[in-house]
Amino acid sequence: MRHVSGRRKEAERLNRDFPFAGSSIESVLLSHAHIDHSGRLPLLYKQGFRGPIYTTPASIDLCGAMLRDTAHILEGDAEFVNRKHPNDPPVEPLFTLDEAANAVELFRPVGYRTPTNVGVNLVMESYDAGHILGSSSIVLTDGKVRLAFSGDVGRPGLPIIRDPEPLPPCDYLIMESTYGGRKHPPTGDAIDTLEEVVTRTIARGGRLIVPAFAVGRTQQLVLLLHQLMNQNRLPAVPIFVDSPLAVDVTGVFRAHPECFDDRVNQYLHDGEDPFGFNRLTYIRDVNESKKLNDRKGPFIVISASGMCEAGRILHHLRNNIGDSRNTVLLTGYQAENTLGRKLRDGWKSVRIFGIPGQVEAEVASLDELSAHADSEELLDWMKPIAPRLKKVFLVHGEPAQSAALADAIRSRYSLEAIPAAPGMSFELSL
Ligand SMILES: [Zn+2]
């Protein structure tokens, strides 16, 4: 326990402190809305930053919904701790709803492939990274050196969004390495896996409980279920998306058709709603959510959070995990020490809201929808720019993944590849 709390303290410190003054930063370029990229922007505001934040229009709208949601959770957590420990000095949330709203005011929209001045002699241009709605890779130049930042790179064939775009020639590349040493199953198999899991669960008379990230994964699952329904490949069961954030985010998706791939555009062209069909119900109201517990017969519920750490999914798990007819379908990355990881690792008993319970339900995984390129896909993505590159810096990966990708880049492209660490600095020249 001491180890966990030590690590939590360290994470807390890293979260609160920037290695620079907020007011010393002129502008921010944001690759995409995921909270591990955008989540500290309100804190940067709080610490004096007032410059522009450049990103795509879809990312701005997603950040609006996500940063508000995060602030709400942080404020609630702080309030809970302060109520539990009235004699300790009060804890402050990392940032408040107001600070989140102030940070969102600083956003400036920049479309894909639109060269934009972001400083003296500094021009940025962004390209679709195919990772989530509005995600981008960014090329920055001072007129001489061209520096590319991959952001998070997606995968060919992911539902809804377009495939990652190749970048123009660049001299240096900062690249993500989340799955730098792994291989994913193909994206095209996701629909078959989903069909199999739903079919066998319904045949048992069970419920399908799907923890899913509210941004991206939920909308992809809805689209795949829609396709399966259209092709008469699913039994006629009701489907619920039970997450206020997912409802908000689905609204953002609808507002950004400029980010869609051909399949979703075809739905729109045919006058169909890709994110709605007659068996699907979106739930915002908490009482409607609670009513699902008493519902008779099989159904599917998609709820957040994706790693089963918070949110309404915990109630659905507590109510359904003890019944062997049911299935829990994990649909994304499950970080260490999360409830999702324990379920994935086959734990037979888990604690939910502090109360231990037996895991009798089937636990299945849908790994085909990973939003991150795997090792081969990263190497393919950088192939067009590899000949001119002088160096590659690897970020956003656990050490083993970055090291594996660095090895692969050296041997495939004979390039210098450096796993980056905090405090490193480099001079970039031609
Ligand atoms: Zn991401």
Image: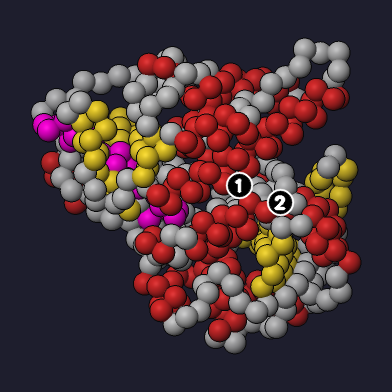
Q: Which numbered disc flags the more N-terminal residue, 2 or 1?
A: 1
- How many numbered circles does the render carry? 2
Percent coordinates x, y for residue 255 in the rendering: 47, 60
Per the image, the residue denoted by label 2 is: 343
262 to the left or right of 167 = right
Q: Residue at x 68, y 77 (%)?
A: 279
Q: Is residue 126 above or below residue 156?
A: above
Magenta segment: 130-151
Splitting the image into 4 quarters, where does residue 406 fall?
top left
Image coords of residue 36 (percent x, y): 51, 37
Q: Nearer the viewer, residue 429 or 205?
A: 429
- Dot 1 alpha-carbon crowd within 10 angstroms: few under 14, some 14 to 19, many 20 or more: some
Say whether mark 2 is within 8 Å of ligand 1: no
Residue 30 in the image, given as x and y percentages of width and height? 39, 38
Q: Do labels 2 and 1 touch, CB within 8 Å?
A: yes
Q: Amino acid at mark 2?
A: Leu
Note whether 254 is above or below 27 in the view shown: below
> Marks 2/1: CA distance?
9 Å
Q: Determine if the magenta segment contains residue 157.
A: no
Label 2 packing within 10 angstroms: few (<14), some (14-19), many (20+)? many
Q: Which residue is mark 1?
A: 334
Q: What amino acid is found at the position of numbered circle 1 in the picture?
A: Gln
User: Which label sits on residue 398?
Assistant: none
Residue drawn at x 86%, y 74% is: 296
Query: Where the C terminus falls, by quadrant?
Result: top left
- Seen from the viewer's position, the closer of residues 16 and 6 is 16
Residue drawn at 17 percent across, 40 percent down:
170
Element type where label 2 sits in the image = helix
Is residue 67 visible in the rendered image? The answer is: yes
